[in-house]
Image (cartoon, helix red, strand yellow):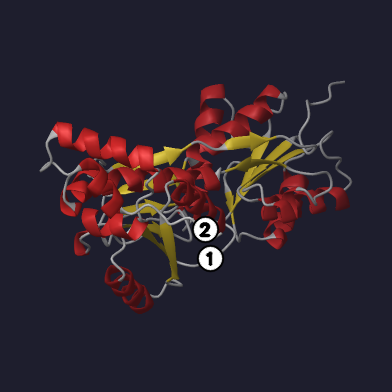
Amino acid sequence: MGRKRSVTISDVAAGAGVSIATASKALNGREQVRAETRARVLQVAEELGFQPNALARGLLSGRTQTAGLLTDGVDRFSLPVLLGAEDAFGAGQMSVLLCDGRGDSIREQHYIRTLLARRVDGLIVVADSTDPRPSITDDLPIPVVYAYGPSTDPADVSFVPDDVGGAGLAVNHLLTLGRRHIAHVTGPVEYLAARDRAAGMRAVLDEAGLPLAGGEVLHGAWSQRWGRQAAELLLTTVPELDAVFCGSDQIAYGVAEAAHELGRRIPDDLAVIGYDNWDVFATEARPPLTTVDMNLERLGRAAAQHLFTAIDGGAGGGVHRMPCRLVVRDSTAPRRTG
């Protein structure tokens, strides 16, 4: 037996008693077709089991069912955003073209021209940090959504992690455990993420009427070495210290190392919280780190879903701050009394 022939749009048109052009318009929701004609075409298509070709639909609608993903670099932060966006595009049956600009403006412009030549329906720009990046929206004839790092133009739509809120989750957790002498060790002050996390911590401490242990935020590199150095300073100058909230898991790992070397028990003597939920550090630390997860895959999915809306002409602008979540592990516990 030969293979069963696929039902074509010609079969649908013949069954409905209309031209192929009219059948195409009816199947794609074009306004030029009368309601009763459209209903008849759709009924015949359903009865015959007609599956319209995606390319043909695109030609009729003026869309290619393709989206572009332009990154400033593929790393441990942008990768989950990309995966989340790709999941959403797959669910919406859109193909994805990924281009890595590597933070180079010339390379970025080349890829933008390439994506436009491929007639993508929309574009997501994925930054390599939460710092604002230059807007490219005005130069493009397609919708653009920014993810992880916001656009410099407030009229653009951007999806970013709520680092202020994430820090608040961490510090509130420490307060509920009875910790009252909490220090903050974080990355370079030039990074918006470091400033936002520090601001979130200060807001919670101010509301609780508590000072920041050590008197100031300790800014340094996003590294274990800086975590060790900062912890050695704090543990020798702030004897009452009972908790450290860190701006990254790398820093928290270094803080925990220094605490062990100085004979401080985690979490009995010192509670430690990290940020990022980076498995390499968070789960391998001794003990495993309580940390803040930015939910980056969810952020990527939200950005892609918004792009669908923008492609249909129904999106607005503004910055969407996506909530983080606290992942509790063994590096935090109630303060021991007595």
Residue labelled with disc 1: 74
Outermost residue to the top:
338
Residue labelled with disc 2: 78
In the depicted view, which residue is nearer to us: 325 or 69?
Answer: 69
Q: Quadrant of residue 62?
A: bottom left
Query: What is the secondary structure assignment of the residue under circle 2?
Result: helix
Q: Quadrant of the N terminus?
A: bottom right
In the rendered structure, the answer to whether residue 81 lies left or right of residue 303 reads right
In the depicted view, which residue is nearer to us: 86 or 108?
Answer: 86
Q: Is residue 150 above or below residue 175?
A: below
Within 10 Å of disc 2 (Cα), the crowding (few <14, some 14-19, many 20+) is many
In the depicted view, which residue is nearer to us: 211 or 294?
Answer: 294
Instruction: Residue at 28%, 47% (x, y): give it.
Output: 12
Q: Quadrant of residue 222?
A: bottom right
Amino acid type for the residue under numbered disc 2: Ser
In the rendered structure, the answer to whether residue 26 lies left or right of residue 132 reads left
Tell me residue 90's x, y (percent): 48, 51
Q: Is residue 75 above or below residue 254?
A: below
**Residue 71 in view:** no
**Residue 291 in view:** yes
Query: What is the secondary structure assignment of the residue under circle 1?
Result: loop
In the rendered structure, the answer to whether residue 39 lies left or right of residue 319 reads left
Q: Quadrant of the C terminus?
A: top right
Q: Are marks 2 and 1 in contact (CB under 8 Å)?
A: yes
Within 10 Å of disc 1 (Cα), the crowding (few <14, some 14-19, many 20+) is some
